[in-house]
Image: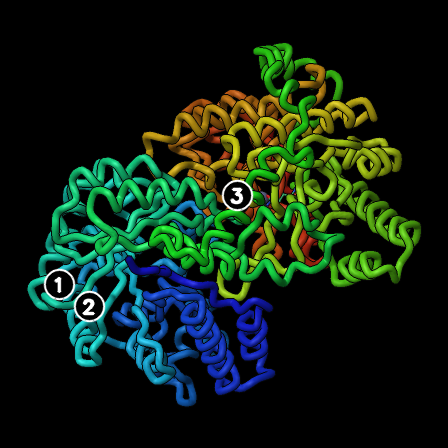
Amino acid sequence: MLTNNLGYPRIGSKRELKKACEQYWSGNSTIQELVQTGREIRKQNWEMQKEAGINLIPSNDFSFYDQVLDLSLTVGAIPKRYHEVILNKGNTELDLYFAMARGYQKDGLDITAMEMTKWFDTNYHYIVPEFLKDQQFKLFSTKLLDEYQESVRLGIKTKPVIIGPVSYLLLGKEKESGFDRIDLIRNLLPVYLELLKKLEEQHVEWVQFDEPFLSLDLTEKDRKAFKYVYAEIKKRFPRLKILLATYFGALQDNKELALSLPVHTLHIDLVRSPEQLKEILADIPAYMGLSLGLVDGRNIWKNDFDASLTLIKSAADKIGHDRLMISPSCSLIHSPCDLELETNEAVLSAEIKQWLSFARQKIDEVAVLNELALNIKTAIPKLKANKIANESRKSSDLIHNNAVKQRVAGITVEDDQRKNTFAVRQQLQKQALNLPLFPTTTIGSFPQTQEVRSWRAKYKKGDLSAEEYNELIKKETEETIRFQEDAGIDVLVHGEFERNDMVEYFGEQLAGFTFTKNGWVQSYGSRCVKPPVIYGDVYRPLPMTVKWSAFAQSLTNKWVKGMLTGPVTILQWSFVRNDQPRSETCTQIALAIRDEVVDLEKAGIKIIQIDEPAIREGLPLRKSDWQDYLQWAVRAFRISASGVKDDTQIHTHMCYSEFNDIIQNISDMDADVITIECSRSQMELLDAFANFKYPNEIGPGVYDIHSPRVPAKEEMVFLLQKAQKVIPSAQLWVNPDCGLKTRHWDETKKALIEMVSAAKVLREYVEEAVTL
Ligand code: GLN
Ligand code: ZN
């Protein structure tokens, strides 16, 4: 039996790579210094894994930005617009690479970055490969070979990791019409073969091909491509040991295909789907080994050794230890680096800490599972310790709160429904709120300046007292209210200056959440996030936002919108407990948010927004699992929103997403008003709402907040008129497309003043039409 790892975090346990990259980008360090940081991180990771007893240690899992972009450079899929960057003297391959990732503004050039999108159902974002009809590939970057050789020089013969050619093509995007990117497989494969030949010359033993698409819905063409690729590789390199890695789900209907491929070992994800082991064991061909993905690469909980050993035993009984490997379920880049860095008990308590395992600890878990499976006596105390920790988690009263469980069990049909239909509510809200046609509003946050951030930092450090901090935030809020009044905005917001982050702010105030000091996970490039940990039953001990919303409302005669993050988004952007279904945890959060909504209403807040930007990204990878998810996700939103009177107006907000395939579910959320991102697509996203005849009110974003550009009134009038063609005027709101926290005040003020003028133009047109 071998121990295997699929990939290790490359950001460095103290985010060394992030810092080194940002230093280099800002011109404060040399490329040699950056390259050196990379080398040190790789060395540390390899040596650590070797010492821990990992047999198959990955290389090429390191990346200065993103592994998909690495591969685009490896196979020479470099869009034409970057060719000038290569030609500019003084630029290295790494400069070209960063230009593709981040855009290039230098030497009189202004080249846009490549697009970025989510890596399957994770919060990691990759750089989307761009393909043309006659796309040619050629071996361009030798990063993979270099890193393999580097490891060999250090005395560690690693297993190079590469994204398989089928998944690579499927991850990309056709940049012109008239072809299907999977048809490029015949052009692409020769580059892989050339690379493998070079690796063979270096006496490589193992190569890991990641083909996560084997856990997704595939077309017949995709399947053919899989067969073709792996047959060719086998033909050319009969002795090379290929580890074919699948993860993030079960093989399901691709099981036969995967088991028919001539690879040495197949890796399967037994965390997402332990059930699939049995079926795979029943059909696995005699030549194939199996890598058991037992240690959860996507979450932070300690492995349950007993449960894992049961799976290992059933596999060993069937095909023998020699054909098995023990592994994490997927690459560990989705886990934080090292739990041992969490030494501050005021942040993460010892009791909770003993239930957790980060990447460094997961490596040990793989090694210990191997020892235990092989009956190595010295490992027995580790099994006992693991049992004790997991038992304590099961029974801890930190986790279990009967009142919360009973409340969830007692939810009735009425609890997820407003008292009356939207048509009735709309009339009541019209009377109560008295808003003009095309009401103007914003999405919630106003610029979070350096200054505002520094107050929070000082407050946390103790350099500012609570009173001093609150006074500063109050002043900022008041100024923001005054600006909105002066600008003539109809529905105001308080500006969210008291919030660090839209999930963390709520997590910090909810029971059942904890935080880490160093639990960083790469989100994209040098950007890392530190997700909260939901470890126990969730409830809201005290109101969370009422004080600030009520304060803001007390300053003005206009309506101030209460501002909350929705249950699905809070769930989606946290590490979630794995001892109950996610739907259960989501329902608990929904009840906590419901309490807040009701308290806001009591405090005189008549308009309340519950943001759900993450609802679409929570969609399962397989279409067949969508409805189940959507059913509980939509219900959670409704539970959070339905505790109020009919004349209280509930808003929701969603960021850039494709709405077409879930429009029915969005409509089922039954928010009185939805604001969505639309401006970048020139209102195209609205088509889904129009075709569906979306019944409630909509605020299609009329300008892009991701750019500092100030849009002119005319542009927004144009977009609104486009929207008017498909959405009745009585249903239309006017707003930017997302929160303004990343913008500067200057551009924000100018843009919002233009936006209000645009709404006025529209109102005048309607009046003229009436008098005519
Ligand atoms: N209310 C939040 C804000 O304005 C919404 C953020 C988001 O959509 N991601 O910042
Ligand atoms: Zn948004």
Q: Which quadrant is home to the N terminus? A: bottom left
**Left or right: where does residue 243 sit relative to residue 344?**
left
Mark 3 near ligand 1 (CB under 8 Å)? no
Residue 357 x, y percent position in the rendering: 54, 53
Is any part of residue 273 visible from this angle? yes
Q: Which quadrant is home to the C terminus? A: top right
Residue 760 x, y percent position in the rendering: 67, 37
Which residue is painted at 50% across and 53% down in the image? Answer: 382
Q: Nearer the viewer, mark 1 or mark 2?
A: 1
Q: Are marks 1 and 2 in contact (CB under 8 Å)?
A: yes
**Left or right: where does residue 728 sit relative to residue 247?**
right
Marks 1 and 2, the one that precedes in the sequence: 2
Residue 226 x, y percent position in the rendering: 16, 52
Marks 3 and 2, the one that precedes in the sequence: 2
Marks 3 and 1, the one that precedes in the sequence: 1
- Quadrant observed for ligand 2 in the rendered image: top right
The amino acid type, in three-letter code, at marker 1 is Ile
Q: Residue furthest front?
A: 377
According to the picture, the residue beneath numbered tag 3 turns out to be 387
Q: Residues within 10 Å of mark 1 (few under 14, many from 20)?
A: some
Q: Which mark is residue 485?
A: none
Q: Residue furthest bottom?
A: 89
Which residue is painted at 57% across and 72% down in the image? Answer: 16
Q: Nearer the viewer, mark 3 or mark 1?
A: 3
Q: Residue furthest left?
A: 235
The amino acid type, in three-letter code, at marker 2 is Tyr
**Left or right: where does residue 713 sit relative to residue 361?**
right
Q: Residues within 10 Å of mark 3 (few under 14, many from 20)?
A: some
According to the picture, the residue beneath numbered tag 1 turns out to be 233
Q: Quadrant of residue 206?
A: bottom left
According to the picture, the residue beneath numbered tag 2 turns out to be 192
